[in-house]
């Protein structure tokens, strides 16, 4: 597989403030990448730099084998063969769905244009509303129109800036899966910016966690969750706590949950402090367990309840429990640990 886009040691500064710090990543042809991070972390600036809307201060951005951006180079956005889906969709209000999609195909012969638009309408499920105007559509339908319009010219790369942020949570999750299926059907490489990790995990083949302009980890969703490279990634991705512990030997750590055993990477292997990442699924409710923990908070989530528990050691952990186990705050419940993946960070 060839790289469709490569960022190498990219930096961006505004008035002396560093926005992007020495950032490098690659996306292979046909892959979907997501840039995940809190507001103001620089992820949209990265997207705009790839699109050609922003110059970079140092490094290179290579698209489809050609350098598009460098300190002394800036290929215009319309020469990069990139499609963009904006946060507000940017649909033309005076054009119906059909003509909105046709906008990017004005240089195509009429017969080919019609065939492509009808195909896209079918793919995005909008055939029956082809003659309606944007104000007559739901938010989800408008999002699909924006996607179809961006895909119509068959770009080498599609960029999406928070494309689901204006939709309700249920529709976001549904559309993120649908959009991924559409992109895979077209074989379109894409990069999406989001602050929502559920969207990133549903969409991306690879996800990059961005913090203060720095790419902390560019990896699969599984590795971000189960093998975070540092404490910042562990804190941002998923839920969990860092439980104080003491390394006993190269496979054992003593904690408030008890003795945890497994493989781990840590600079010290004998009698030294460590913080152990404990996810909610690592702590299992078991009425028959002699080990008890006090419920100090509860968060009802429909099929499950997220309990915050205080251990006998005074440490706190999270536990995700089926919601028919509905216990009051202050009650002590039995727990067992099922920590299969030991992740340690320096205390």
Image: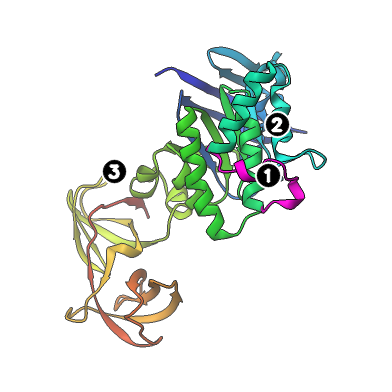
Q: Residue at x 71, y 20 (%)?
A: 78
Disc 2 vs disc 1: which is toward the camera? 1
Q: CA distance from mark 1 to mark 3?
A: 44 Å
Find residue 257 and report its horizontal and vertical position in percent: 25, 69
Magenta-drawn segment: 123-138
Q: Is residue 191 above or below residue 224?
A: above
Quarter of the figure that contains the C terminus:
bottom left
* Quadrant of residue 147 within the rendered picture: top right
Q: Residue furthest right?
A: 94
Which element type, helix, strand or loop, lies under badge 3? Answer: loop
- Residue on which the image places disc 1: 87
Find residue 259 and report its horizontal and vertical position in percent: 19, 64
Which element type, helix, strand or loop, lies under badge 1? Answer: loop
Q: Is residue 147 above or below residue 324?
A: above
- Residue on which the image places disc 3: 267
* Quadrant of residue 85 within the rendered picture: top right
Residue in the foreground of this view, choosing between 25 and 305:
305
């Amino acid at each position: 597989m060839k790289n469709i886009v490569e960022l190498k040691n990219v930096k961006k500064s505004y008035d002396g403030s560093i926005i992007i710090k020495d950032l490098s990543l690659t996306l292979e042809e046909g892959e979907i990448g997501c840039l995940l991070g809190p507001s103001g972390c620089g992820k949209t600036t990265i997207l705009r730099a790839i699109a050609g809307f922003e110059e970079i201060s140092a490094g290179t951005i290579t698209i489809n084998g050609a350098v598009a951006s460098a300190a002394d180079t800036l290929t215009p956005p319309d020469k990069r063969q990139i499609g963009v889906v904006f946060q507000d969709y940017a649909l033309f209000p005076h054009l119906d769905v059909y003509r909105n999609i046709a906008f990017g195909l004005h240089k195509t012969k009429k017969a080919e244009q019609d065939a492509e638009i009808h195909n896209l309408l079918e793919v995005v499920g909008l055939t029956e509303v082809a003659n309606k105007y944007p104000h007559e559509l739901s938010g989800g339908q408008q999002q699909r129109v924006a996607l179809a319009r961006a895909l119509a010219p068959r770009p080498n790369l599609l960029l999406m800036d928070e494309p689901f942020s204006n939709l309700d949570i249920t529709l976001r999750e549904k559309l993120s899966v649908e959009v991924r299926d559409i992109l895979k059907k077209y074989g379109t490489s894409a990069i999406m910016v989001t602050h929502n990790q559920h969207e990133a995990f549903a969409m991306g083949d690879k996800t990059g966690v961005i913090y203060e302009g720095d790419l902390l980890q560019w990896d699969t969703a599984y590795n971000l969750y189960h093998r975070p490279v540092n404490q910042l990634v562990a804190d941002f991705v998923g839920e969990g706590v860092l439980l104080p512990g003491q390394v006993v030997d190269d496979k054992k750590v003593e904690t408030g949950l008890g003795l945890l055993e497994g493989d781990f990477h840590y600079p010290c292997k004998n009698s030294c402090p460590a913080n152990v990442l404990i996810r909610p699924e690592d702590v299992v409710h078991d009425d028959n367990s002699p080990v008890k923990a006090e419920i100090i908070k509860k968060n009802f989530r429909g099929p499950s309840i997220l309990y915050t528990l205080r251990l006998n050691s005074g440490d706190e952990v999270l536990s995700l429990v089926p919601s028919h186990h509905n216990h009051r705050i202050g009650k002590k419940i039995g727990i067992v640990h099922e920590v299969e993946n030991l992740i340690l960070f320096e205390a």
